[in-house]
Amino acid sequence: MGKDYDILLIPARYNKNIELSDEIIAQLPEKIMLFASVQFLNNLDSIKQQLEAKGRKISMRESKNYLYNGLISDKGQLLGCNMENFSSKEDFDAFLYIGDGLFHPKALAVNNNKDIFCYDPKIEKLHVIEKNLHDEYSKRRKGAKLKFLTSKNIGIIITTKIGQANPKRAEALRKNILSKWPDKKVFMFYANELNFLELENFNFIDIYVNVACSRIGHDDIKRTPMPIINIADAEELVRE
């Protein structure tokens, strides 16, 4: 996989206070799980206090990295690959995400059938990602699982990007597939940048297993006619 590098991560924090208006808070349900992107983590304690002062019950959780299952160091931090099922572990009504953009909070919809309230402090606007997005993701996953089971030629995509690369997990999956289904064939594809047009050159592949950013198997599949399943779902099928 090449040379190892020392990496220094320096988060850039939002340097303004965030005050939620009464109008914004009035739109929120009673029990809320609170998350933010790394830029706004320093504001979460203040936001939590504001919400509790208005009668809201707030919880904050650590979440797991998709590929390595390692805990993120900061409670309440949300990454785009955090697709953990929080609904099965705690009773709450909805998520509140503090940050700009919708990429990060949409990750919560993959395994949680909850509304996601997204507050952008820069423009002071509230947007709601409705829980029916969870149904859309679930239908895609179900279709990908069925395709995986019936596929003969399986391609495994492994990224070389630092922080996402996990060739050992990909190799373990390859061995387990061949052990359970000797009639299947598995091909390994390594790439730093995933080009969906290039995947179409390998038209003998029936389905690709994604061992890179987990959102590829949920959002980016709209960009290609090639079926794609995330490694966690493929591993689940192998274990059954």
Image (tube, rainbow, N blue to C red):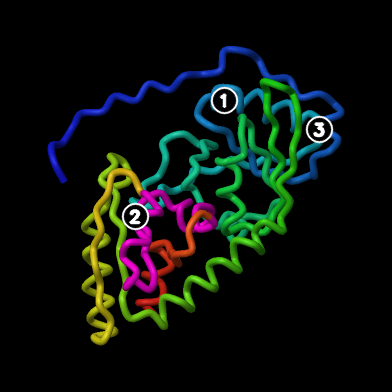
Residue 85's quadrant in the figure? bottom right
Mark drawn on residue 40: 1
Circle 2 sits in a helix, a strand or a loop, which is it? helix
Residue 12 rendering spot, x and y as whole percentages: 46, 19
Q: CB atoms at circles 3 and 1 under 8 Å apart?
A: no
- Mark earlier in primary sequence (3, 1): 3
Residue 37 rendering spot, x and y as whole percentages: 54, 32
Residue 90's quadrant in the figure? bottom right
Above-or-below relation of 116 to 187: above
Mark drawn on residue 25: 3
Number of the front mark, 2 or 1 = 2
Check disc 2 and report the residue beneath it.
198
Residue at 28 percent across and 44 percent down: it is 192
Circle 1 sits in a helix, a strand or a loop, which is it? helix
Q: Is residue 151 left or right of residue 79?
A: left
- Mark earlier in primary sequence (2, 1): 1
Q: Amino acid at mark 1?
A: Phe
- Mark earlier in primary sequence (3, 2): 3
Q: What is the span of residues highlighted in magenta in the rendered image?
A: 195-222
